[in-house]
Image: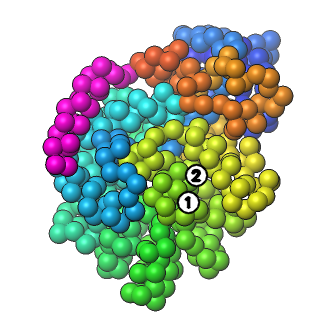
């Protein structure tokens, strides 16, 4: 199928190109240019982009999509209390069906807000994969692995099966990583086993690292080193790794991350809400560490809104460092697009509007008052735009939202399923 978006302004690596056409063949962008340039016009479908701004789809580089089920379930609680006394007991009651519909709700929210790819770590992952395929959203999935749990071995085997079943499936829409949850839920021997499995299978790893000061202090007490230094000792970073959070890191930790090419998912809103702290994003950037942005699970956020995450990243570090040059508008957009794509394992060809890149494209409607006037498009994207400006979304060359109408999700059914889920989990709280 060939598609063409016409008369659109496009945010490209060379800057904003005005009144161009984007020609898409199959899953990738084949040409970007003016109609009077030699650009093919044999498209099966033409999408009128008049007045719109085309951006690469946003990448949510760390989340737990089915945790939409626990939105507002336990708020204003510290991380360990939140996990041990609220979230983990509720998660024991999850089923494939609940996770499937929780994932569909997440995908509706993400697509509505311009997110076209996500990187997930959770359980009942076949249900997440099926929901992603049914919706047509790009996902990198990992089975959350807690080595301390009695089913640690079984979960690792399930994660490998998930990889064999879904990695590269559906025109490359899905990828699968191994998901050791965190150093405080995985003993050293288990991490070694995960690293060996990753090497044997050719898999990457997605883990939470150094999220709270308490995690770091406990790791020093038990192992004499930081979580990041401990993971390096155990050989985890010998395989390509995505580390979520990295809030409490020192110079030595940052050097390890840089040297080992560990990619980082920065989750500013979740870190603020759970009172974990502020990750040293600019120090990571200075070391050349690849960083993407994530919402984390929406039970600790409580949204899956990448425009908000991008804006928070741009503002938070300026205020925190008292440096107006920290995380510029352009850098904030890069974190939410190309940086996220690299963080979740796409070395190139995702998160950017250029020839040869995957056709994950969003069109922003700029008729809102908050877009007027617009002296600098980059600045308006980073500081003014919001998720409700998103008009049309294409993933892997397929339209999934047109004029704000979700094309692949039965939203009435999703609402019905959420009503049932809320009743079920509310009775558990009593
Ligand atoms: Zn997380």
Q: Which of 62 and 367 is in front in this view?
A: 367
Q: How many marks?
A: 2
Q: Where is residue 39 in the image (x, y as percent from the top left)?
A: 72, 17
- Note whether ligand 1 is within 8 Å of mark 2: no
Residue displayed at 25% across by 72% down:
148
Residue displayed at 46% across by 81% down:
217
Q: Position of residue 30 (x, y in %)?
A: 64, 26
Residue displayed at 31% across by 46% down:
73
Residue furthest right as drawn: 375
Whether residue 71 sits left or right of residue 367 in the image: it is left
Give the SS element for disc 2.
strand
Q: Distance between the residues labelled 2 and 1?
A: 6 Å
Whether residue 254 is visible here, answered yes or no, is yes
Label 2 sits on residue: 292
Please report the bounds of the magenta region as a residue range.
408-430
Residue displayed at 72% across by 48% down:
331
Q: Which of 428 and 222 is in front in this view?
A: 428
Q: Which mark is residue 264?
A: 1
Q: Position of residue 265 (x, y in %)?
A: 53, 56
């Amino acid at each position: 199928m060939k598609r063409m978006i016409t008369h659109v302004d496009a945010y490209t690596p060379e800057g904003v190109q005005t009144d161009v056409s984007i020609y898409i063949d199959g899953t990738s962008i084949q040409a970007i240019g003016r109609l009077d340039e030699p650009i093919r016009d044999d498209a099966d479908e033409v999408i009128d982009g008049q007045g719109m701004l085309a951006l690469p789809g946003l990448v949510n580089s760390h989340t737990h999509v089915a945790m939409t089920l626990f939105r507002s379930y336990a708020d204003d609680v510290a991380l360990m209390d939140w996990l041990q006394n609220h979230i983990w007991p509720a998660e024991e009651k999850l089923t494939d069906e609940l996770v499937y519909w929780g994932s569909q709700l997440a995908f509706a929210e993400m697509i509505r807000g311009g997110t076209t790819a996500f990187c997930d770590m959770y359980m009942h992952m076949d249900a997440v994969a099926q929901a992603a395929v049914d919706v047509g959203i790009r996902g990198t999935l990992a089975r959350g692995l807690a080595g301390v749990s009695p089913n640690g071995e079984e979960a690792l085997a399930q994660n490998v099966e998930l990889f064999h079943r879904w990695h590269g499936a559906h025109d490359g829409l899905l990828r699968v990583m191994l998901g050791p949850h965190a150093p405080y839920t995985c003993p050293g021997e288990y991490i070694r086993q995960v690293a060996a499995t990753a090497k044997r299978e050719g898999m990457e790893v997605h883990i939470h690292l150094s999220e709270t000061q308490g995690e770091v202090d406990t790791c020093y007490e038990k192992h004499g080193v930081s979580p990041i230094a401990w993971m390096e000792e155990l050989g985890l970073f010998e395989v390509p790794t995505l580390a979520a959070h990295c809030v409490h890191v020192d110079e030595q930790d940052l050097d390890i991350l840089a040297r080992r090419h560990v990619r980082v998912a920065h989750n500013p809103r979740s870190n603020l809400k759970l009172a974990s702290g502020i990750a040293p994003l600019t120090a990571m950037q200075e070391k050349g560490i690849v960083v993407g942005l994530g919402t984390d699970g929406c039970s600790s956020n409580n949204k899956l809104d990448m425009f908000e995450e991008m804006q928070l990243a741009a503002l938070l570090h300026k205020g925190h460092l008292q440096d107006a040059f920290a995380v510029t508008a352009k850098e904030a957009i890069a974190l939410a697009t190309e940086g996220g794509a690299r963080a979740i394992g796409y070395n190139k060809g995702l998160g950017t509007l250029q020839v040869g890149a995957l056709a994950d494209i969003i069109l922003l409607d700029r008729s809102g008052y908050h877009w007027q006037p617009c002296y600098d498009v980059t600045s308006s994207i980073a500081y003014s735009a919001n998720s409700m400006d998103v008009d049309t979304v294409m993933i892997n060359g397929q339209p999934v939202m047109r004029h704000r109408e979700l094309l692949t999700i039965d939203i009435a059914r999703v609402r019905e399923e959420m009503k049932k889920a809320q009743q079920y989990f509310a009775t558990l709280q009593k």
